[in-house]
Image (cartoon, rainbow, N blue to C red):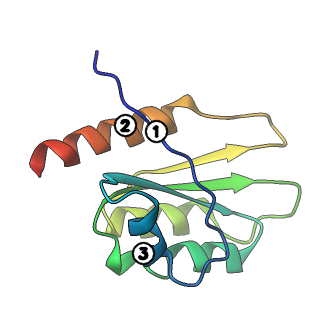
């Protein structure tokens, strides 16, 4: 088993996510982008710079107390079209997924080995 160091940084609301990402850690190999399934603007913000993602990515929808505005199928379709796995977690149902971090680590190791 290989050890992987994960850095978690919240950059929500920043205008130029790709530039900020490079300053956060220039050797970044995977990115996990999280949005609120109850807020369509949250989804739009997370995916707006997706064409510029130069690293492996994981898309995560977080279900809160608000009603659903972004359907699972919409997020899944978007993620597949960008070669990213899609997961959902729920604070209401207390479902949190360790598999998200395992997948991010797997993608980072795979991406690193290709560079």
* Comparing labels 2 and 3, the label whose residue is closer to the camera: 3
User: Residue 5: x percent and y percent?
Assistant: 41, 34
Residue under pointer 3: 18
Is 64 on the left or on the right of 115, as rendered?
Answer: right
Q: Are marks 1 and 2 in contact (CB under 8 Å)?
A: yes
Residue under pointer 2: 105
Q: Residues within 10 Å of mark 1 (few under 14, many from 20)?
A: few
Q: Residues within 10 Å of mark 3 (few under 14, many from 20)?
A: some
Towards the viewer: 56 or 62: 56
User: Residue 46: x percent and y percent?
Assistant: 56, 72
State the SS at label 3.
Answer: helix
Residue occupying the point 62% across, 56% down: 61
Residue occupying the point 30% across, 61% down: 55
Task: Identify the mark at residue 6; answer none if there is no mark.
Answer: 1
Distance, label 2 to label 3, CA atoms, is: 20 Å
Towards the viewer: 66 or 71: 66
Residue occupying the point 67% across, 35% down: 96
User: Residue 58: x percent and y percent?
Assistant: 44, 53
Towards the viewer: 25 or 66: 25
């Amino acid at each position: 088993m290989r050890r992987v160091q994960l850095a978690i940084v919240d950059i929500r609301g920043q205008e130029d996510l790709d530039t900020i990402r490079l300053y956060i850690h220039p050797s970044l190999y995977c990115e996990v982008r999280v949005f609120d399934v109850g807020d369509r603007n949250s989804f739009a913000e997370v995916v707006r710079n997706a064409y510029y993602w130069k690293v492996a990515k994981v898309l995560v929808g977080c279900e809160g107390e608000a009603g659903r505005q972004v359907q699972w199928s919409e997020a899944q379709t978007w993620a597949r079209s960008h070669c990213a796995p899609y997961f959902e977690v729920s604070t209401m149902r207390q479902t949190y997924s360790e598999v998200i971090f395992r997948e991010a680590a797997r993608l980072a190791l795979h991406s690193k080995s290709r560079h």
